[in-house]
Image (cartoon, helix red, strand yellow):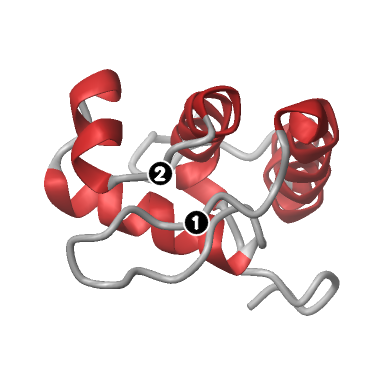
Amino acid sequence: MSTQTGRPPLHEDYWDVCKVSVLVLTQQFAAQSFVMRHTGLSYDRTRRVLDLMEGWGIVGPADGTIARDVLRSRDELGAVLDELHEDWERSTAWIRAAAAEGARPVGEGPR
């Protein structure tokens, strides 16, 4: 959990969570098979993204084969994307700071 927001951190899942949030909120439908079909994500990836979205209060919990409840309205899409982006910015700030100080990727030799 992110200590600042109480929500699960997004890190590498940010883009997939944003993409699925747009789909789910515009269609107001959150079945795993629907998301897989429309995004091309794998079963495991889709489940992870929907679980993250549950932690963010965007969709309800999984209940077997029944579609998850969509907890946010279509009109809230902009606000949801803003919240996701703010958390991603906060959680990746250290990467940008290290790059600004001249840090190099792991495995890259001396200059």
Q: Quadrant of residue 107?
A: top left
Q: Which residue is mark 1?
A: 69
Residue type, label 2: Ala
* Residue name at image x 59 percent, y 32 percent: 25
Q: Is residue 59 above or below residue 25?
A: below
* Residue name at image x 70 percent, y 34 percent: 99
In space, the residues marked 2 and 1 are separated at their CA atoms by: 7 Å
* Residue name at image x 67 percent, y 44 percent: 95
Where is residue 17 shown, x and y percent of the image?
A: 51, 40
Q: Which residue is mark 2?
A: 30
Say whether residue 96 is left or right of residue 107: right
Say whether residue 60 is left or right of residue 49: right
Q: Quadrant of residue 102?
A: top right
Element marked by disc 1: loop
Element marked by disc 2: loop
Where is residue 6 shown, x and y percent of the image?
A: 76, 77
* Residue name at image x 27 percent, y 20 percent: 38
Q: Quick one: label 2 or label 1, which is nearer the N terminus? A: 2
Q: Quadrant of the N terminus?
A: bottom right
Q: Residues within 10 Å of mark 1 (few under 14, many from 20)?
A: some
Q: Is residue 51 above or below residue 111?
A: below
Whether label 2 touches label 1, CB < 8 Å? yes
Q: Is residue 67 above or below residue 54?
A: above
Q: Is residue 2 above or below residue 43?
A: below
Say whether residue 69 is left or right of residue 84: left
Residue type, label 1: Asp
Q: Residues within 10 Å of mark 2 (few under 14, many from 20)?
A: many
**Pick the front one: 86 or 71:** 71
Count of residue discs: 2
